[in-house]
Amino acid sequence: MFEIDGLDLKYQGQSILQQVSLRIAHGERVALIGKSGAGKSTLLAHLRALQPQQIAWCPQHTGLVPMLSVYHNIYMGALHRHNSIYNLANLIRPLSRPFQEVAQLADQLLLRNWLLTSVDQLSGGQQQRTAIGRALYQQKPVFIGDEPVSGLDDFQANTLLKLIAERHSTLILALHDIEQALQLCDRIIGLKDQRIALDAPSASLSAADLTPLYQ
Ligand SMILES: Nc1ncnc2c1ncn2[C@@H]1O[C@H](COP(=O)(O)OP(=O)(O)OP(=O)(O)O)[C@@H](O)[C@H]1O
């Protein structure tokens, strides 16, 4: 699905990652780890740009529209599936079919009681779950998430990661929780010192193998 060969990635002229070579096949579950500033978001943004049509994107900063409801923010994941008249009509007054679909999703995200609440009235974790809902409602085969569950407690984080995994054939997730990465993903890619410092199957790794990435 993704193939990169000897790529240098920069931000405003500053080198972020050097000589990145990477292949990710359909069906893989990949965790991207590394300390803050290692370049995880930069690499995810690059992968996303390679296959934009295939990817459900869940960014680190939720980018929700604060004065719109949970329903409308989740529905935004489906804007590309409908014409602008349909989207506008639904904005003014929720249409029955998308409303039922989003309500069902909201149940799974534990957001049912807030469906018609504007997101600026929600907690940070509720907003994060809304952003996950918007990404799930994109209904794409590949999910790329940049710390998608970082603000949630372990129970919710694991429940939502499972939901994300059930609905996507391929996962690429920046995760700061090493245990989550090892449990959910079958491959770990670690970034350090502007390079891919580790790329190995999760089954061959323990948490101790990953700590040097953070030193
Ligand atoms: N929008 C931005 N503004 C300023 N610097 C940026 C921006 N995006 C990337 N950079 C630079 O790129 C480097 C890598 O950032 P990136 O966000 O990719 O790292 P990260 O591993 O995702 O970090 P974190 O875990 O803190 O989100 C940063 O150290 C910073 O110098």
Image (cartoon, rainbow, N blue to C red):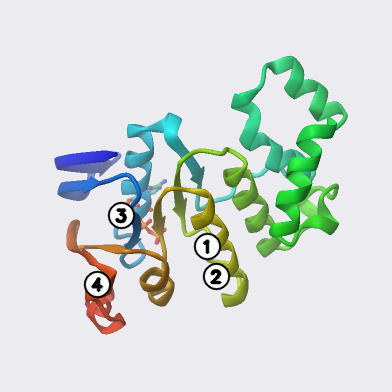
Quadrant of the image occupied by residue 123: bottom right
* Front label number (4 vs 2): 2
- Side of 79 relative to 67 (left or right): left
Find out if the beta carbon at label 3 lies less than 8 Å from the nearest ligand 1 atom.
Answer: yes
Q: Amino acid at mark 2?
A: Asn
Quadrant of the image occupied by residue 188: bottom left
> Is residue 144 shown above or below 155?
above
| Pointer 3 residue | 39
> Please, what secondary structure does the residue beneath circle 1 have?
helix
| Pointer 1 residue | 161
Residue that appears at 88% across and 29% down? 93
Q: Amino acid at mark 1?
A: Leu
- Side of 136 relative to 209 (left or right): right
Query: Tags 3 and 4 in contact by the CB under 8 Å rule?
Result: no
State the separation of the CA atoms marked 4 and 2.
23 Å
Residue that appears at 29% across and 60% down? 38
| Pointer 2 residue | 158
Tell me, for residue 126, which label it has, or none: none
Quarter of the image that includes the C terminus: bottom left
